[in-house]
Amino acid sequence: MKKFSLIVLFASLIAAGTAKAAPTLNSFPTATATILLDFDGHDVNSSMWNYGTPFSCLPATMTDAEITEAFNRVAEDFRPFNVNVTTDLTKFLAAPLSQRVRIIITPTSAWYAGVAGIAYVTSFTWGDDTPAFVFSDRLVNDPKRVAEAISHETGHTLGLYHQASFDANCTLTSAYSTGVGTGITSWGPIMGNVASKNVTQWNYGATPNGCNYLQDNLSVITTTNGFGYRTDDHADLLKSATAVSITNNIFATSGIISTTTDKDFFKFSLGTTGNFKLNATPFNVGSGFSGANLDIKVTLMTSRGAVIGNYDFTDSLNAKIDTTLKAGTYIVVVDGSSSINIANDYGSLGAYTLNGSYGAASTTTTNTITTTNGKKTAANLSIEIVTEKTQKEIFKVIKQAQQPVIVNATEAYDYMVVDNFGRIILNGKAAAGTKTIDIRNQPAGIYNLRLINANEQRTEKFMNR
């Protein structure tokens, strides 16, 4: 919460020097601009607080594990930027005065009632070390709630005001937007009141001043505080795609989507026909992709840029590819998706990992995949492509298959048939069991069949003759 009024005098508190220091953590140690998360207690001597009278803040009564989780959540909020989130005082003191801020996380809250935190707007650049506060006792030391408050108050110091909600008639419904949705893809703006949402992001939205007074969070952060975005880590061009090595049929790499226009291109060189599996996972701190900011979409393309398939779960934040590919060079493009914030993918930024395997093609229709909680389970979809003349042709002859297509599935799923121009020919939902998909009324040619459910996403080609 931002506040401009002076703070009333309160009694001196016990000094904070006896507590164990927080773990030393840095999100981007080479960056100059610095945000210090001070969990260790601090003697405040600032003309902006308590009428200039010094006072002491107690250390946060959080465990190392709780502090680390809160730090990781905040670090991910600031991952796109050229700024270091740290618990290391030496890093803070080495930063220029006009490019640093101390966020004091403390149970010393009695002096200011009714808020979870407090900060001065634009104080990051003031050059006098005016701190901001997050009251951990009022957040019951919960890492998620503490982290949301830290990022929110830090946002104020960087020049941001609250994000509000308005109805269709432009009437203010809440000065603090509470976001939308439930579950894994529930979303809200960091500068709102969104502790109940799984994914919180920087936003381009209305302020309490009116529905037409829009605040561009990313622009404010990166143009008014002496730092901008991180240097792009992977090229946005086909010809400059990052080559990914496959060793013993296994590969892994990582990256950061740092701007709304950023796309990361990766190149895979495959020596033989085989089964290509890729898992794209956003940075997170726990089950349900908790703490993630990035909703991932991946696109599989030929070396010339022709799209083979798009992979984007509408009810999750990750993406998967599981398909058979011929020998050759392929491109995988990682991008932020818009399935969380219904309006756009503006704030879908952050870190991710890619990992997977590539091996000889198999006719087995049940594979093993890894779910978001790390447990292994049988894949839920198997595809059997059947021609009108025979039912013996399956995966290994999929490109010779004709109509109709028969899908055998052990769980409900969504399906979509797309032509080579990217047009959706047929789509719908199907229950577990056997389903026939028939497009013999469409022109002859090669089509893509996409099958999606919570545990697996798959695209296969078939021929319509």
Image (cartoon, rainbow, N blue to C red):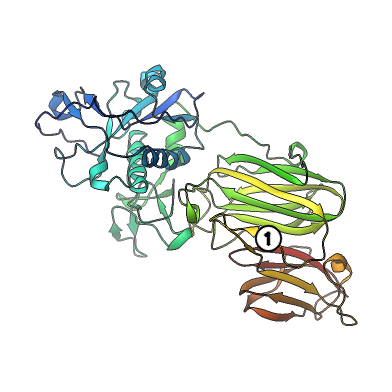
Name the residue rendered at 39%, 29% in the picture.
87
Q: Secondary structure at mark 1?
A: strand
Q: Is residue 1 visible?
A: no
Q: Position of residue 336 (x, y in %)?
A: 58, 49
Q: Is residue 139 left or right of residue 416?
A: left
Q: Nearer the viewer, residue 201 or 37?
A: 37
Q: Position of residue 105 (x, y in %)?
A: 29, 36
At a point 35% along the width and 53% down the height, the residue shown is 194
**Quick check: 253 left or right of 142?**
right
Quadrant holding the C terminus: bottom right
Q: Is residue 197 left or right of residue 453?
A: left
Residue placed under numbered mark 1 in the picture: 368
Q: Quadrant of residue 157?
A: top left
Residue at image location 86% in from the left, 54% down from the top? 273
From the viewer's perspective, is residue 460 above or below residue 201?
Answer: below
The answer to which image quadrant residue 430 occupies is bottom right
